[in-house]
Amino acid sequence: MPQEPTRHHTTTDVRDWRGRRYTVGPTARELTGLPRSALLVRALVAVAAVGVLQFGYGAAVPVLVEAHGWSPAQALAPFLVWALVQGSLAPAPHWLRTRGLLGPGPVVCAGALLCGAALFTLGHSASPVAAVLGYGVLGGAGAGLVYHSCADLVGGWFPDRHTVRLGVVGGAFALGAVPLLPAVVLGLSPDALPPASTALAAVVVALGLAGGAGQREAPERWWPPGNDPCATALRRRADPPAAGDFSMGQAWASGRSLPALHAVVALSGTSALFALAALPTLLLGLGRPPSDVAAVITALALASGLGRLAASTAAERTGRRRTLALLMAATALALVALAAAAPAGPVQLLVLLALVVGAGTGSCYPLTRAITEGHFGSQRAPGLQSLVHGSKAVGGLLGVGGAMAVLSLAPAGTHAGFLAAAGVLPAVAALLAARLRRPLPIRTIPRQTRVWTAAARRAPM
Protein backbone atom coordinates (compact mmCIF):
# COMPACT_ATOMS: atom_id res chain seq x y z
CA MET A 1 0.00 0.00 0.00
CA PRO A 2 1.31 3.48 -0.76
CA GLN A 3 2.47 5.36 2.29
CA GLU A 4 1.19 8.82 3.11
CA PRO A 5 3.75 11.51 2.40
CA THR A 6 5.56 12.81 5.44
CA ARG A 7 4.44 16.27 6.46
CA HIS A 8 7.27 18.75 6.78
CA HIS A 9 6.74 21.82 8.92
CA THR A 10 8.56 24.96 7.87
CA THR A 11 10.55 26.62 10.65
CA THR A 12 12.84 29.63 10.68
CA ASP A 13 15.50 30.34 13.31
CA VAL A 14 15.71 34.02 14.24
CA ARG A 15 17.87 36.04 16.63
CA ASP A 16 16.82 39.41 18.04
CA TRP A 17 19.09 42.35 18.82
CA ARG A 18 20.01 40.86 22.19
CA GLY A 19 20.97 37.51 20.70
CA ARG A 20 17.91 35.58 21.86
CA ARG A 21 16.92 32.69 19.62
CA TYR A 22 13.39 32.01 18.34
CA THR A 23 12.00 29.20 16.21
CA VAL A 24 9.25 30.73 14.08
CA GLY A 25 6.59 28.26 13.00
CA PRO A 26 4.86 25.99 12.39
CA THR A 27 1.40 27.01 13.58
CA ALA A 28 -0.23 25.56 16.67
CA ARG A 29 -2.85 23.90 14.47
CA GLU A 30 -0.16 22.11 12.48
CA LEU A 31 1.49 20.91 15.67
CA THR A 32 -1.56 19.92 17.72
CA GLY A 33 -4.56 19.94 15.40
CA LEU A 34 -6.08 22.87 17.34
CA PRO A 35 -5.64 26.64 17.13
CA ARG A 36 -4.02 28.52 19.99
CA SER A 37 -7.37 29.92 21.08
CA ALA A 38 -8.75 26.41 21.66
CA LEU A 39 -5.68 25.38 23.66
CA LEU A 40 -6.10 28.52 25.76
CA VAL A 41 -9.80 27.96 26.45
CA ARG A 42 -9.22 24.37 27.51
CA ALA A 43 -6.44 25.36 29.90
CA LEU A 44 -8.62 28.10 31.42
CA VAL A 45 -11.49 25.68 31.95
CA ALA A 46 -9.25 23.37 33.96
CA VAL A 47 -7.81 26.22 36.04
CA ALA A 48 -11.23 27.74 36.75
CA ALA A 49 -12.52 24.37 37.94
CA VAL A 50 -9.79 23.86 40.56
CA GLY A 51 -9.83 27.50 41.70
CA VAL A 52 -12.88 26.80 43.88
CA LEU A 53 -10.61 24.91 46.28
CA GLN A 54 -8.92 28.18 47.25
CA PHE A 55 -11.53 30.88 46.78
CA GLY A 56 -14.48 28.89 48.06
CA TYR A 57 -12.96 27.45 51.21
CA GLY A 58 -13.29 30.45 53.52
CA ALA A 59 -16.97 30.80 52.65
CA ALA A 60 -17.53 27.15 53.58
CA VAL A 61 -15.79 27.32 56.99
CA PRO A 62 -18.96 28.17 58.99
CA VAL A 63 -20.78 25.22 57.38
CA LEU A 64 -17.86 22.87 58.10
CA VAL A 65 -17.84 23.94 61.74
CA GLU A 66 -21.56 23.21 62.10
CA ALA A 67 -21.67 20.04 59.98
CA HIS A 68 -18.63 18.26 61.46
CA GLY A 69 -18.58 19.77 64.93
CA TRP A 70 -15.13 21.25 64.36
CA SER A 71 -13.57 24.28 65.98
CA PRO A 72 -12.56 27.15 63.64
CA ALA A 73 -8.93 25.99 63.90
CA GLN A 74 -9.85 22.42 62.91
CA ALA A 75 -11.93 23.73 60.00
CA LEU A 76 -9.04 25.84 58.71
CA ALA A 77 -6.33 23.18 59.16
CA PRO A 78 -7.04 21.48 55.79
CA PHE A 79 -6.82 24.86 54.05
CA LEU A 80 -3.52 25.63 55.78
CA VAL A 81 -1.97 22.39 54.47
CA TRP A 82 -3.59 22.98 51.07
CA ALA A 83 -1.94 26.39 50.74
CA LEU A 84 1.44 25.01 51.79
CA VAL A 85 1.33 22.14 49.31
CA GLN A 86 -0.17 24.13 46.44
CA GLY A 87 2.45 26.86 46.69
CA SER A 88 5.36 24.46 47.22
CA LEU A 89 4.55 22.53 44.04
CA ALA A 90 5.01 25.56 41.79
CA PRO A 91 8.29 24.26 40.28
CA ALA A 92 7.05 20.65 39.92
CA PRO A 93 5.41 20.79 36.44
CA HIS A 94 8.44 22.58 34.98
CA TRP A 95 10.75 19.99 36.56
CA LEU A 96 8.69 17.07 35.23
CA ARG A 97 8.48 18.55 31.75
CA THR A 98 12.13 19.47 31.34
CA ARG A 99 13.18 15.95 32.33
CA GLY A 100 10.78 14.33 29.91
CA LEU A 101 8.78 12.57 32.63
CA LEU A 102 5.28 14.00 32.15
CA GLY A 103 3.81 16.55 29.81
CA PRO A 104 1.17 19.12 30.76
CA GLY A 105 -1.82 17.04 29.60
CA PRO A 106 -1.33 14.05 31.92
CA VAL A 107 -0.31 16.34 34.79
CA VAL A 108 -3.49 18.43 34.48
CA CYS A 109 -5.67 15.31 34.34
CA ALA A 110 -3.97 13.80 37.40
CA GLY A 111 -4.34 17.07 39.27
CA ALA A 112 -8.06 17.26 38.49
CA LEU A 113 -8.61 13.75 39.86
CA LEU A 114 -6.78 14.68 43.07
CA CYS A 115 -8.91 17.81 43.46
CA GLY A 116 -12.09 15.76 43.04
CA ALA A 117 -10.94 13.36 45.75
CA ALA A 118 -10.18 16.32 48.02
CA LEU A 119 -13.66 17.81 47.69
CA PHE A 120 -15.33 14.45 48.25
CA THR A 121 -13.27 13.83 51.40
CA LEU A 122 -14.07 17.25 52.84
CA GLY A 123 -17.81 16.74 52.50
CA HIS A 124 -18.02 13.14 53.71
CA SER A 125 -15.42 12.80 56.47
CA ALA A 126 -15.80 14.35 59.92
CA SER A 127 -12.24 13.37 60.87
CA PRO A 128 -9.90 16.39 60.93
CA VAL A 129 -6.94 14.14 60.09
CA ALA A 130 -8.70 12.69 57.05
CA ALA A 131 -9.66 16.18 55.91
CA VAL A 132 -6.07 17.40 56.25
CA LEU A 133 -4.74 14.44 54.27
CA GLY A 134 -7.51 14.40 51.68
CA TYR A 135 -8.12 18.10 51.14
CA GLY A 136 -4.82 19.55 52.28
CA VAL A 137 -2.31 17.11 50.78
CA LEU A 138 -4.21 15.63 47.82
CA GLY A 139 -6.14 18.78 46.97
CA GLY A 140 -3.11 21.04 47.36
CA ALA A 141 -1.04 18.78 45.12
CA GLY A 142 -3.82 18.57 42.54
CA ALA A 143 -4.48 22.32 42.41
CA GLY A 144 -0.75 23.07 42.23
CA LEU A 145 -0.23 20.66 39.35
CA VAL A 146 -3.19 22.03 37.38
CA TYR A 147 -2.49 25.72 37.98
CA HIS A 148 1.22 25.71 37.28
CA SER A 149 0.99 23.28 34.35
CA CYS A 150 -1.60 25.51 32.68
CA ALA A 151 0.48 28.63 33.39
CA ASP A 152 3.49 27.04 31.70
CA LEU A 153 1.31 25.70 28.89
CA VAL A 154 -0.24 29.08 28.08
CA GLY A 155 3.10 30.81 28.43
CA GLY A 156 4.63 28.49 25.84
CA TRP A 157 1.88 28.97 23.27
CA PHE A 158 1.57 32.76 23.74
CA PRO A 159 5.13 34.14 23.87
CA ASP A 160 3.99 37.16 21.85
CA ARG A 161 1.07 38.23 24.05
CA HIS A 162 2.19 39.35 27.51
CA THR A 163 -1.27 39.97 28.96
CA VAL A 164 -2.55 36.54 27.97
CA ARG A 165 0.62 34.81 29.07
CA LEU A 166 0.88 36.44 32.48
CA GLY A 167 -2.62 37.33 33.66
CA VAL A 168 -5.27 35.14 32.13
CA VAL A 169 -4.51 31.88 33.96
CA GLY A 170 -4.53 33.54 37.36
CA GLY A 171 -7.70 35.39 36.44
CA ALA A 172 -9.49 32.17 35.57
CA PHE A 173 -8.27 30.58 38.80
CA ALA A 174 -10.08 33.25 40.85
CA LEU A 175 -13.14 33.74 38.64
CA GLY A 176 -14.07 30.06 38.59
CA ALA A 177 -15.37 30.28 42.17
CA VAL A 178 -17.43 33.46 41.70
CA PRO A 179 -20.71 31.78 40.59
CA LEU A 180 -20.59 29.39 43.58
CA LEU A 181 -19.81 31.79 46.42
CA PRO A 182 -23.30 33.24 46.97
CA ALA A 183 -24.76 29.72 47.00
CA VAL A 184 -22.16 28.53 49.52
CA VAL A 185 -22.83 31.39 51.93
CA LEU A 186 -26.60 31.65 51.50
CA GLY A 187 -27.80 28.20 50.53
CA LEU A 188 -25.39 25.53 51.79
CA SER A 189 -26.71 23.85 54.92
CA PRO A 190 -24.88 21.21 57.01
CA ASP A 191 -27.24 18.48 55.74
CA ALA A 192 -26.55 19.46 52.12
CA LEU A 193 -22.77 19.38 52.50
CA PRO A 194 -22.17 15.70 51.48
CA PRO A 195 -24.25 15.72 48.26
CA ALA A 196 -22.99 19.20 47.36
CA SER A 197 -19.36 18.15 47.75
CA THR A 198 -19.98 15.05 45.64
CA ALA A 199 -21.58 17.06 42.86
CA LEU A 200 -18.83 19.68 42.94
CA ALA A 201 -16.13 17.00 42.89
CA ALA A 202 -17.70 15.45 39.78
CA VAL A 203 -17.87 18.83 38.02
CA VAL A 204 -14.24 19.66 38.88
CA VAL A 205 -13.02 16.29 37.61
CA ALA A 206 -15.05 16.53 34.39
CA LEU A 207 -13.87 20.06 33.60
CA GLY A 208 -10.29 19.25 34.53
CA LEU A 209 -10.17 16.22 32.28
CA ALA A 210 -11.79 18.16 29.44
CA GLY A 211 -9.22 20.90 29.80
CA GLY A 212 -6.18 18.67 30.18
CA ALA A 213 -6.72 15.63 27.97
CA GLY A 214 -4.41 15.71 24.97
CA GLN A 215 -2.76 19.03 25.81
CA ARG A 216 0.74 19.39 24.41
CA GLU A 217 3.41 21.92 25.25
CA ALA A 218 4.85 24.27 22.66
CA PRO A 219 8.29 23.43 21.26
CA GLU A 220 11.25 25.10 22.91
CA ARG A 221 11.72 28.74 21.81
CA TRP A 222 8.59 28.46 19.64
CA TRP A 223 7.19 31.64 18.12
CA PRO A 224 3.93 31.88 16.12
CA PRO A 225 4.37 32.54 12.40
CA GLY A 226 3.11 35.84 11.07
CA ASN A 227 4.51 37.79 14.01
CA ASP A 228 8.10 39.02 13.84
CA PRO A 229 9.89 38.34 17.17
CA CYS A 230 12.55 40.92 16.32
CA ALA A 231 9.90 43.63 15.97
CA THR A 232 8.40 42.54 19.28
CA ALA A 233 11.80 42.75 20.97
CA LEU A 234 12.21 46.32 19.68
CA ARG A 235 8.71 47.42 20.75
CA ARG A 236 8.67 50.44 23.01
CA ARG A 237 7.62 49.51 26.55
CA ALA A 238 7.52 51.08 29.97
CA ASP A 239 9.92 48.39 31.17
CA PRO A 240 12.99 47.49 29.08
CA PRO A 241 13.66 43.81 28.42
CA ALA A 242 16.13 41.90 30.55
CA ALA A 243 19.81 42.57 29.99
CA GLY A 244 20.30 38.85 29.34
CA ASP A 245 19.04 35.37 30.12
CA PHE A 246 20.17 34.52 33.64
CA SER A 247 20.76 31.04 34.97
CA MET A 248 19.43 30.15 38.41
CA GLY A 249 22.82 30.74 40.01
CA GLN A 250 23.34 34.04 38.21
CA ALA A 251 19.90 35.25 39.31
CA TRP A 252 20.61 34.53 42.97
CA ALA A 253 24.04 36.16 42.74
CA SER A 254 22.85 39.25 40.87
CA GLY A 255 21.76 41.26 43.92
CA ARG A 256 18.63 41.82 45.98
CA SER A 257 16.06 41.56 43.20
CA LEU A 258 15.21 37.86 43.44
CA PRO A 259 14.99 37.73 47.28
CA ALA A 260 12.83 40.87 47.22
CA LEU A 261 10.43 39.28 44.72
CA HIS A 262 10.11 36.24 46.99
CA ALA A 263 9.33 38.54 49.92
CA VAL A 264 6.70 40.49 47.97
CA VAL A 265 4.85 37.30 47.00
CA ALA A 266 5.01 35.96 50.56
CA LEU A 267 3.74 39.21 52.10
CA SER A 268 0.95 39.70 49.60
CA GLY A 269 -0.04 36.03 49.83
CA THR A 270 -0.21 36.24 53.62
CA SER A 271 -2.66 39.14 53.57
CA ALA A 272 -4.73 37.60 50.75
CA LEU A 273 -5.07 34.17 52.34
CA PHE A 274 -5.74 35.68 55.78
CA ALA A 275 -8.64 37.65 54.27
CA LEU A 276 -9.99 34.64 52.37
CA ALA A 277 -9.82 32.38 55.41
CA ALA A 278 -10.94 34.75 58.18
CA LEU A 279 -13.24 37.35 56.61
CA PRO A 280 -16.45 35.25 56.29
CA THR A 281 -16.31 34.03 59.90
CA LEU A 282 -15.22 37.46 61.11
CA LEU A 283 -18.15 39.23 59.44
CA LEU A 284 -20.67 36.68 60.69
CA GLY A 285 -19.23 37.03 64.19
CA LEU A 286 -19.76 40.79 64.02
CA GLY A 287 -23.44 40.24 63.31
CA ARG A 288 -23.41 40.95 59.58
CA PRO A 289 -26.17 39.11 57.71
CA PRO A 290 -25.20 36.28 55.33
CA SER A 291 -26.21 38.41 52.35
CA ASP A 292 -23.53 40.98 53.27
CA VAL A 293 -20.96 38.23 53.70
CA ALA A 294 -21.83 36.73 50.32
CA ALA A 295 -21.51 40.12 48.61
CA VAL A 296 -18.12 40.89 50.19
CA ILE A 297 -16.58 37.47 49.53
CA THR A 298 -17.85 37.40 45.95
CA ALA A 299 -16.42 40.87 45.34
CA LEU A 300 -13.06 39.75 46.74
CA ALA A 301 -12.83 36.78 44.36
CA LEU A 302 -14.19 38.74 41.38
CA ALA A 303 -11.65 41.53 41.82
CA SER A 304 -8.83 39.05 42.32
CA GLY A 305 -9.58 37.53 38.93
CA LEU A 306 -10.24 40.71 36.98
CA GLY A 307 -7.42 42.53 38.75
CA ARG A 308 -4.86 40.08 37.41
CA LEU A 309 -5.97 40.77 33.86
CA ALA A 310 -6.19 44.54 34.30
CA ALA A 311 -2.85 44.83 36.08
CA SER A 312 -1.03 42.90 33.35
CA THR A 313 -2.44 45.30 30.75
CA ALA A 314 -1.81 48.47 32.77
CA ALA A 315 1.76 47.49 33.59
CA GLU A 316 2.69 47.51 29.90
CA ARG A 317 1.98 51.27 29.88
CA THR A 318 2.84 52.45 33.38
CA GLY A 319 5.61 50.02 34.33
CA ARG A 320 5.45 46.77 36.24
CA ARG A 321 7.36 47.88 39.32
CA ARG A 322 5.37 51.11 39.67
CA THR A 323 2.05 49.32 39.15
CA LEU A 324 2.90 46.65 41.71
CA ALA A 325 3.98 49.20 44.33
CA LEU A 326 0.83 51.30 43.88
CA LEU A 327 -1.48 48.29 44.11
CA MET A 328 0.24 46.97 47.22
CA ALA A 329 -0.08 50.39 48.87
CA ALA A 330 -3.77 50.56 47.94
CA THR A 331 -4.28 47.08 49.40
CA ALA A 332 -2.72 48.13 52.70
CA LEU A 333 -5.05 51.13 53.01
CA ALA A 334 -8.09 49.09 51.97
CA LEU A 335 -7.45 46.40 54.61
CA VAL A 336 -7.27 49.01 57.35
CA ALA A 337 -10.46 50.69 56.10
CA LEU A 338 -12.22 47.33 55.76
CA ALA A 339 -11.43 46.49 59.37
CA ALA A 340 -12.80 49.86 60.51
CA ALA A 341 -16.00 49.52 58.46
CA ALA A 342 -16.66 45.82 59.18
CA PRO A 343 -18.69 46.25 62.41
CA ALA A 344 -21.29 48.76 61.21
CA GLY A 345 -20.29 50.21 57.85
CA PRO A 346 -22.64 50.10 54.86
CA VAL A 347 -22.37 46.97 52.78
CA GLN A 348 -21.63 49.04 49.67
CA LEU A 349 -18.47 50.36 51.33
CA LEU A 350 -17.42 46.86 52.37
CA VAL A 351 -17.86 45.62 48.81
CA LEU A 352 -15.83 48.52 47.42
CA LEU A 353 -13.00 47.89 49.85
CA ALA A 354 -13.10 44.14 49.14
CA LEU A 355 -12.73 44.94 45.44
CA VAL A 356 -9.55 46.93 46.16
CA VAL A 357 -8.10 44.18 48.38
CA GLY A 358 -8.91 41.47 45.84
CA ALA A 359 -7.48 43.41 42.90
CA GLY A 360 -4.31 44.32 44.78
CA THR A 361 -3.48 40.89 46.17
CA GLY A 362 -4.50 39.08 43.00
CA SER A 363 -2.42 41.28 40.72
CA CYS A 364 0.74 40.50 42.68
CA TYR A 365 1.16 37.09 41.02
CA PRO A 366 1.17 38.07 37.31
CA LEU A 367 3.15 41.23 38.02
CA THR A 368 5.89 39.41 39.92
CA ARG A 369 6.03 36.84 37.12
CA ALA A 370 6.43 39.68 34.62
CA ILE A 371 9.09 41.40 36.72
CA THR A 372 10.97 38.12 37.09
CA GLU A 373 11.01 37.73 33.32
CA GLY A 374 11.97 41.36 32.81
CA HIS A 375 14.86 41.07 35.25
CA PHE A 376 16.22 37.64 34.38
CA GLY A 377 15.17 36.95 30.78
CA SER A 378 12.50 34.90 29.07
CA GLN A 379 14.27 31.77 27.86
CA ARG A 380 15.35 30.57 31.31
CA ALA A 381 12.68 32.42 33.29
CA PRO A 382 9.91 29.78 33.60
CA GLY A 383 11.82 27.97 36.32
CA LEU A 384 12.56 31.24 38.12
CA GLN A 385 8.93 32.37 37.83
CA SER A 386 7.75 29.14 39.41
CA LEU A 387 10.33 29.51 42.15
CA VAL A 388 9.13 33.04 42.97
CA HIS A 389 5.49 31.95 42.91
CA GLY A 390 6.39 29.15 45.32
CA SER A 391 6.75 31.78 48.06
CA LYS A 392 2.97 31.64 48.22
CA ALA A 393 3.54 28.62 50.48
CA VAL A 394 5.01 30.98 53.09
CA GLY A 395 1.95 33.19 52.65
CA GLY A 396 -0.28 30.18 53.24
CA LEU A 397 1.54 29.24 56.42
CA LEU A 398 1.39 32.76 57.84
CA GLY A 399 -1.97 33.83 56.43
CA VAL A 400 -4.10 30.77 57.12
CA GLY A 401 -2.13 29.97 60.26
CA GLY A 402 -2.76 33.52 61.46
CA ALA A 403 -6.47 33.16 60.73
CA MET A 404 -6.57 29.94 62.75
CA ALA A 405 -4.91 31.62 65.71
CA VAL A 406 -7.08 34.75 65.57
CA LEU A 407 -10.43 32.94 65.23
CA SER A 408 -9.55 30.39 67.91
CA LEU A 409 -7.62 32.36 70.52
CA ALA A 410 -8.39 36.07 70.18
CA PRO A 411 -11.57 37.57 71.72
CA ALA A 412 -14.30 38.12 69.13
CA GLY A 413 -14.21 41.89 69.59
CA THR A 414 -10.57 42.09 68.49
CA HIS A 415 -10.82 40.17 65.21
CA ALA A 416 -11.24 43.30 63.09
CA GLY A 417 -8.09 44.73 64.63
CA PHE A 418 -6.06 41.80 63.34
CA LEU A 419 -7.48 42.43 59.87
CA ALA A 420 -6.20 46.00 60.11
CA ALA A 421 -2.82 44.74 61.32
CA ALA A 422 -2.63 42.56 58.20
CA GLY A 423 -2.48 45.80 56.22
CA VAL A 424 1.12 46.25 57.36
CA LEU A 425 2.20 43.34 55.15
CA PRO A 426 1.22 44.77 51.73
CA ALA A 427 2.63 48.14 52.89
CA VAL A 428 6.03 46.48 53.35
CA ALA A 429 5.57 44.73 50.00
CA ALA A 430 4.93 48.12 48.37
CA LEU A 431 8.21 49.48 49.73
CA LEU A 432 10.12 46.42 48.49
CA ALA A 433 8.48 46.64 45.06
CA ALA A 434 9.36 50.32 44.73
CA ARG A 435 13.03 49.50 45.39
CA LEU A 436 13.30 46.71 42.82
CA ARG A 437 16.03 47.28 40.26
CA ARG A 438 16.83 45.37 37.10
CA PRO A 439 20.14 43.49 37.56
CA LEU A 440 22.95 43.28 35.04
CA PRO A 441 24.25 39.87 33.93
CA ILE A 442 27.29 38.56 35.75
CA ARG A 443 30.25 37.63 33.56
CA THR A 444 32.86 35.33 35.06
CA ILE A 445 36.43 36.28 34.12
CA PRO A 446 38.43 33.23 32.99
CA ARG A 447 41.18 32.14 35.40
CA GLN A 448 43.99 32.73 32.88
CA THR A 449 42.81 36.28 32.33
CA ARG A 450 42.73 36.92 36.09
CA VAL A 451 46.33 35.62 36.45
CA TRP A 452 47.54 37.73 33.54
CA THR A 453 45.80 40.83 34.93
CA ALA A 454 47.33 40.30 38.40
CA ALA A 455 50.81 39.85 36.89
CA ALA A 456 50.40 43.01 34.80
CA ARG A 457 49.49 44.99 37.87
CA ARG A 458 52.63 43.79 39.69
CA ALA A 459 54.96 44.53 36.76
CA PRO A 460 57.14 47.68 37.05
CA MET A 461 56.02 50.60 34.96
Image: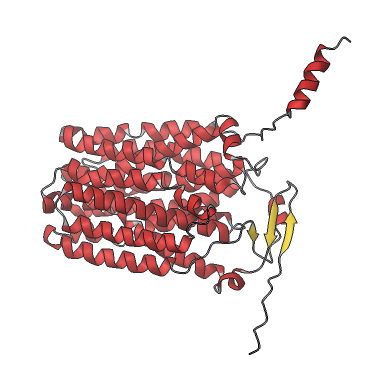
Quadrant showing the N terminus: bottom right
* Residue drawn at 69 percent across, 73 percent down: 8
Q: Is residue 334 visible?
A: no
* Residue drawn at 75 percent across, 23 percent down: 450
Looking at the image, is 343 positioned above or below residue 204? above
Q: As drawn, which residue projects farthest toward the front? A: 1
Q: Is 201 positioned to the left or the right of 69 in the image?
A: right
Q: Position of residue 36 (x, y in %)?
A: 55, 67
Q: Position of residue 165 (x, y in %)?
A: 54, 56
Looking at the image, is 130 positioned above or below residue 441? below
Q: Is 155 positioned to the left or the right of 412 in the image?
A: right
* Residue drawn at 32 percent across, 38 percent down: 397
* Residue drawn at 34 percent across, 69 percent down: 206
Q: Position of residue 67 (x, y in %)?
A: 12, 54
Residue 228 vs residue 211, the one in the foreground: 211
Q: As drawn, which residue projects farthest toward the top? A: 460
Looking at the image, is 184 positioned above or below residue 3? above
Quadrant showing the C terminus: top right
Count of residue discs:
0
Question: Dividing the picture into quarters, in which one does residue 84 lie?
Answer: top left
Give the image's coloring scheme: secondary structure
Looking at the image, is 319 positioned above or below residue 209? above
Q: Is 157 positioned to the left or the right of 67 in the image?
A: right
Residue 145 vs residue 285, the one in the foreground: 145
Q: As drawn, which residue projects farthest toward the right? A: 461
Question: Dividing the picture into quarters, in which one does residue 9 lie?
Answer: bottom right
Q: Position of residue 24 (x, y in %)?
A: 69, 62
Q: Is 51 positioned to the left or the right of 366 in the image?
A: left
Residue 405 vs residue 358, the one in the foreground: 405
Q: Is residue 237 visible?
A: yes
